[in-house]
Amino acid sequence: MYETNTNKQKIKLFLVILIPILITQLSMYAMNFFDTVMSGNAGAGELAGVAIGSSLWVPISTGINGILMALSPIVAQMVGAKKEQDIPKTVQQGIYLSIGLGLVVSIIGFLFIEPILSFMDLESHVRYVAKYYLITIGIGIIPLFIFNLLRCYIDALGQTRMSMFIILLSLPLNIIFNYVFIFGKLGFPALGGIGAGLASALTYWLCCGITIFVVYKVNPFRAHKIFSSWTPPSLHAWWEQLRIGVPIGFSIFFEVSIFSAVTLFMSVYNTFTIAAHQAAINFASFLYMIPLSIATALTIAVGYEIGAKRINDAKAYSYMGIASGVVIAFLAGFILYAFDDPVAKLYNANPEVVALTKNFIFYAIFFQFADAFGAPLQGILRGYKDVNITFWMSLVSYWLIGLPSGWILANYASFGPYGYWMGLIIGLSAGAITLFGRMIYLQNKLSKQFNKKILNQY
């Protein structure tokens, strides 16, 4: 990161940060994408099992990774304020925290996977695939969290191309692992959807190992000596990260978990409906990586400018990011509308599953508009370290407005399973509107404080 003086310079720097993040996010989600597509080609039951397993795993993993994302604005503001000497101990405490959170998630999963799946009305094979998909992917929980923590540190320094490089190395191996374990190649048994979980776990270990090597050996990370002179775990340091990270994590959890909750509610429908829902949500989520990448870039850029006390520059980056999100919304909507049939056939060749998937994709066109507008706003507010209010906004928008609306439309109107998707549209739209209002309020508040400070100097 560096100071910019014109909008042209800001656009150039923003793109330099954004493009590697975008490639990284698309590549990371491509792992889940290939899990789903390749499992679907192993059978509708395998796809449905992975759908149920993912609906339980993804909200937890993204929520915890959201907590670890607190490191990005913290480090970005340290860089902007020229306090880089504090970075090593901050990252070390983040590593301790990621290991602790990984252990907690593993214990909770061990205790509750079986009761949760038994509670759901699933076909026996679908339940079996979901259970062991979760167990195998759990092997990689701790390395996944350490990797994401270190990636936040790398990105906060503006070195987003390094994260891109690590993921681009790992993605082809993930596809190979999927091919080997799902379909039973090179002498391994065909594990179907369970093989997708094992492939993901092995990839998490690979990503973690490469990232540790990079941080230890490659400049500018090497200069911080993250793995030298370890400080002991500090509850105070953990609290400083959790104070920012927990609201971020829960905000992400509330947004992601509403999709998972919908998948769980879909368990009352037949296997084809579950499979079609998962296929459509998987591809729509793949497109969502674009506004999510914009959000991550905005957190870094806004955080850096706020750390340097450049209020107007932070505002300029904010509106640049929002405009990018709107453009992406129209592009993603066109892709979903124009290519619904080939997209549906990527996941499964069954005509009934394809027809249902295309119906779900139609609704995805509308809710991705709200996503493309709302995600950058979340990134902006994280850059300001304004995270508590977004936590409550997410809870109300997604769980008190979106999900109840979907349940009513699905069960008391003629929409059936599509009613839940209409609820998603309502909830995401409500969230985007409230986040925009919060951003305007915060920017006006900071501008008044800044102007008052200047007047007091005279």
Image (tube, helix red, strand yellow):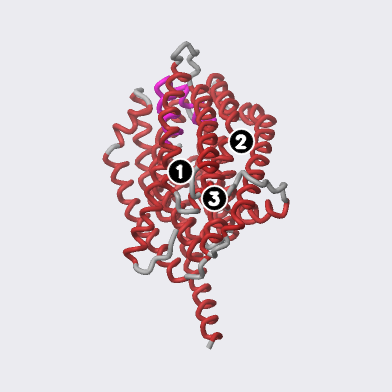
- Residue at 65 percent across and 41 percent down: it is 101
Question: What amino acid does circle 3 point to?
Answer: Ala
- Residue 121 seen by the camera: yes
- Residue 393 seen by the camera: no
N-term mark: 3 or 1: 1
Q: Is residue 36 magenta?
A: yes
Question: What amino acid does circle 1 point to?
Answer: Ser
Q: Which residue is mark 3?
A: 223
Question: What amino acid does circle 2 point to?
Answer: Ile
Viewer-proximal residue among 10 and 400 = 10
Mark nearest the camera among 2 and 1 is 1
Q: Is residue 51 above or below residue 285?
A: above
- Residue at 51 percent across and 45 percent down: it is 151
Mark nearest the camera among 3 and 2 is 3
Left or right, 230 with reference to 156: right
Q: Position of residue 346 (x, y in %)?
A: 34, 29
- Residue at 51 percent across and 31 percent down: it is 206
Stretch in magenta: 30-53
User: In the rendered structure, are the residues bearing label 3 and label 1 in contact, judged by CB atoms less than 8 Å apart?
Assistant: no
Q: Which residue is mark 2?
A: 142
Q: Is residue 329 above or below residue 308?
A: above
State the residue lying farthest toward the top: 187
Q: CA distance from mark 3 to mark 2?
A: 26 Å
N-term mark: 3 or 2: 2
Q: Say what secondary structure mark 1 lies in.
A: helix
Q: Say what secondary structure mark 2 lies in.
A: helix
Q: Which residue is mark 1?
A: 163
